[in-house]
Amino acid sequence: MDVAFVLYPRMTALDLVGPYEVLGHQPEVTSHFVAASREPVTTDAGLVVVPTATFAELDRADVIVVPGGGGWAEVLEEGVVAAWLRVAHPTATWTASVCSGSTLLAQADVLDGRPATTHWALRDELAARGAVVATDRVVVDGSVVTGAGVSAGIDLALTLVGLIWGDERARFTQLLIEYDPEPPYRAGSPESAPAELVALARGVFAGR
Amino acid sequence: MDVAFVLYPRMTALDLVGPYEVLGHQPEVTSHFVAASREPVTTDAGLVVVPTATFAELDRADVIVVPGGGGWAEVLEEGVVAAWLRVAHPTATWTASVCSGSTLLAQADVLDGRPATTHWALRDELAARGAVVATDRVVVDGSVVTGAGVSAGIDLALTLVGLIWGDERARFTQLLIEYDPEPPYRAGSPESAPAELVALARGVFAGR
């Protein structure tokens, strides 16, 4: 089973690595890291990752994972990820996005009229692109699975493992990565965080 | 503030990227990725990351983060990470480990007689190396912060942000990464997972 993780400059590394850690260890999986070129890609805060294939070299995969990140607006403008998704999505068994990766799926018309989720600060952005935006952490609609912001990629990927290989496999994976979260604060959603922090965070996203 | 993330072959990418995503965006932080050489490092399931410095080139940092992973037994045997920690830890403000990274801290005598945590399947391994092993998800003891398995790196790093810059900063970071976890299963700890899965997972770790 080929899993293609999309890479692009300034992407959020955790949007990639949450799903990678969960999916990449399944014995059936071969992971591919696909980008516009084979040049190393600098992620959001300086970590450099290396593609294994270009979009031209790999045009199909059983599972596609599109992360979000700081570079999503530029990538939308270039259209290179959406162009690849128009080719690769129709033959994929599952197509998934994390965070602002959802806007790239929308650009490729994957989310037209579909229920989908995204980072809480980008719900209007996604709705404007034709998706029926939900506030859930993970949304499964047919073959398309979307996740909320950044850390939701772990929940999304465990959901996907359950759908593909069953609950027992997903539980085993969860146990191996000791995913028994204990956030030291209660501030992970706009409902739980102080209002002034929510406003500040919206400003960060608006400025991108 | 210089944060040094240690890289080595077969390390668990999420042990690195959880803390990276939380610490790397703090405006005061410059992230460094330190390894035995500048050669790209292949992590646990094929993702390749690129070091920015060798252990010889960077011998001090304000914060040190040591991830765990499949290669920890080989790295223990080589002793190269422990040798670097003996130089870098005494001048660091904070030294942290995720998952089996704790055994590398122990090898460098950082955990002698200290309370510390690690991946649930490696508690005996860590106790045998002189630490006072706790079952907590994150343990702070003086300047040393240890985390449980893999995904605990996110909780650890948010704890560290709170200690360094205060609760408000940590809450803001948690909101930006929408860390409002909703694991689709209840199986992330040996207490919550079915006993047969716990036995199977212990076997995986014993076989490393």
Image (spheres, coloured by chain):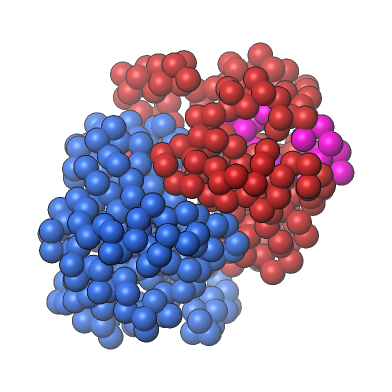
Chain colours: A red, B blue
Residue A91 is a magenta residue:
yes
Q: Report the quarter where the N terminus of chain B lies.
A: top left
- Which range of residues does the magenta coloring cover? A84-106
Q: Position of residue B70 (x, y in %)?
A: 49, 72
Overall secondary structure of the magenta section: helix
Instruction: Please identify the quarter of the rendering in which residue B204 is found.
Output: bottom right
Q: Nearer the viewer, residue B143 or A191?
A: B143
**Would residue B48 be seen by someone viewing this image from the given angle?**
yes
Residue A122 vs B39, above or below: the answer is above
- Residue occupying the point 71% across, 62% down: A29
Q: Does the rendering let one see residue A92?
A: no
Q: Nearer the viewer, residue A109 or A172?
A: A109
Vertical placement of residue A133 versus A55, above or below: above
Give the answer, above or below, for where A10 lies relative to B153.
above
Task: Identify which residue is drawn at 46% across, 74% down.
Answer: B71
The image quarter in which residue A76 lies: top right
x, y (%) of residue B81? 31, 71
Q: How many marks?
A: 0
Where residue B179 sits: x, y (%)? Answer: 43, 40
Q: Is residue A3 left or right of residue B104?
A: right
A54 falls in the magenta region: no
Closest to the observer: B165 or B55?
A: B55
Q: Residue at x 64, y 57 (%)?
A: A23
Question: Residue A206 appears at what percent x and percent y?
Answer: 46, 16
Residue at image location 25% in from the left, 69% down from the top: B84
* Residue B15 placement, left or right of A124: left
